[in-house]
Image: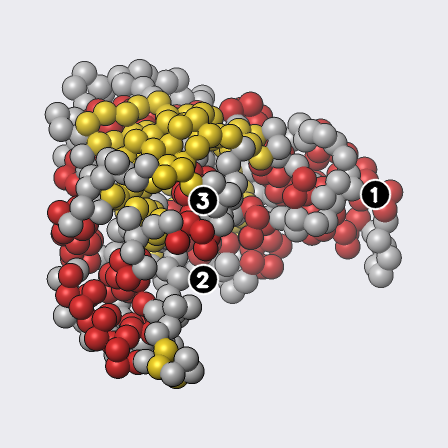
Amino acid sequence: MGLVLEGLTKRYGVTLALDAVDLHVASGHVHALLGHNGAGKSTLIKCLAGATTPTAGTIALDGRTLTDLTPRRATAAGVAVIHQHLSLVGNLSVADNLFLGQERRTGGVFTARRHQQEVAAETLRTLGSRLSPRTLVADLPVGQRQLVEIAKALQRDARLLVLDEPTASLSAQEATRLVELVERLRAQGLTILYVTHLLEEVIRLSDRVSVLRDGRRVFDADTAGLGTADLAAAVSGRRGVTRTPPPAVPAQAPVVLRTRGLAGRGMGPVDLDLRAGEVVALFGLVGSGRTRILETLYRGGTQDTQVDGRTVATGSPARSLAAGITLVPGDRHTQGLFGTLGAQENSVFRVMGPLGRRPWRSPRAERRAFEEVAARVALRPRLAHQPAERFSGGNQQKILLSRSLNERAALRVLLLDEPTQGVDVGARAEIYTVVRAVAERGATVLFATNEAEEVLALAHRCLLVADGRVVDEVDVATTDAAALTARLHPGTALAGAPTPPGGDRR
């Protein structure tokens, strides 16, 4: 029977994260789920895992309707979610991780470690692994840790395995082994929902594929007979439709940001020259390193980083801020907003000192500053003291943006990581307007995304990112959304769509 979702809906205030999604994953099949960030994939996974409660709709597994799910109840029902960030305990052995929270006891007191190790070894053998159950998880590479996470799910009698971007952090060899493991699990009759951005994996592995966009299921078909071009068009929503890019920035426009040899953990070296009034996209898949490029630049750059021709003192975000470089992170909940503080405090906290007269703050000046930037970003409702967590996703993002727009912030370089992730269509258009206005005032904008439409809507230039490096540049004036999406997937050719110059050197 497998997994059946009917009318699955989830609202967060005015934001509709899932809109009456129907999905059927047959038993013993691999069903791929595609969609841009913010399309609803994560929300759907959270509903299955019991981490969030749907507003409406039903979830059924093997003919049994699952209601009032919590993480514990979802596990008991046979649902196992393998997230990108694994939930293993590094200082415990493989066997101890497999039985964590469900330890076998002797005499009701002592852990039956030998028995657990024997059972764990057998579970690992069913996965084709000879890994010792006594090995500490901390000593394992990422690929084997992921195998342990899957073994843990099987140990708990999982009937539905949800794999969330399983190869995003794996090497090519580890990714190949994981694909082989998924094929083995399918042969054993396990139902698998495979969430990924990699179109080649979908074609190779899945029996059926669905695409989410803006919380709705917009595509659902058997994978047989499909090509990566079909999937690229389904994800982007367009095939062969040319978009008009923003007006070109004059070649004589001064360089605002110049960096050479930018490097950090998992990325680099990267050279960048960004001009005044220019909006540049870092376009790549999840795990490509696009976010690390932004974070490395913000956290200190290199000794050869200049803003407006002046060398930036390296080593910390504080020095970057002083030079006019600011970052709006992709995860606004854990990296950006202070959820329980009001919109005004979130917006002006970086400039409270300049707005007041040390050691005193100036509530009046802070309120004026907030009202000014709130108007620029079209914040709704414009309630200064309403906690940030009570605003919609789009307005939370506007609050984060407003933090960089105060005149006292002296913004010269705006770094944006997934600027419209989890944002509805209306707020997205307003955020685009704000970003363009930043560039029109003479600053420069560098943003990271995996959405082709976002590149075409905002960017003057598009830099393709893979393995932490800029590997190519795409002329946004001669491409469309489907062709641009295909550039991230080697071997994809779109019939009738314009081909960007320069080929694919990834």
Give neighbour class at mark 3: few <14, some 14-19, many 20+ (Cα, 10 Å): some
Q: Which mark is residue 64?
A: none
User: Residue 332: x and y, percent?
Assistant: 56, 46
Q: Amino acid at mark 2?
A: Gln
Residue 433 horizontal side relative to residue 352, left or right:
left
Quadrant containing the C terminus is top left
* Image marks 1 and 2: residues in contact by CB distance under 8 Å: no
Q: Quadrant of the N terminus?
A: top left
Task: Point out the tag, 1 or 2, that comes first from the N-terminus.
Answer: 2
Question: Which of the pair 79/170 is nearer the observer?
Answer: 79
Q: Secondary structure at mark 1?
A: helix
- Residue hosting label 2: 303
The spot of residue 25 in percent (x, y) is 27, 35
Q: Position of residue 216 (x, y in %)?
A: 41, 25
Question: Dot 3 corresponds to which residue?
Answer: 46
Question: What amino acid is at disc 1?
Answer: Ala
Q: Secondary structure at mark 3?
A: helix
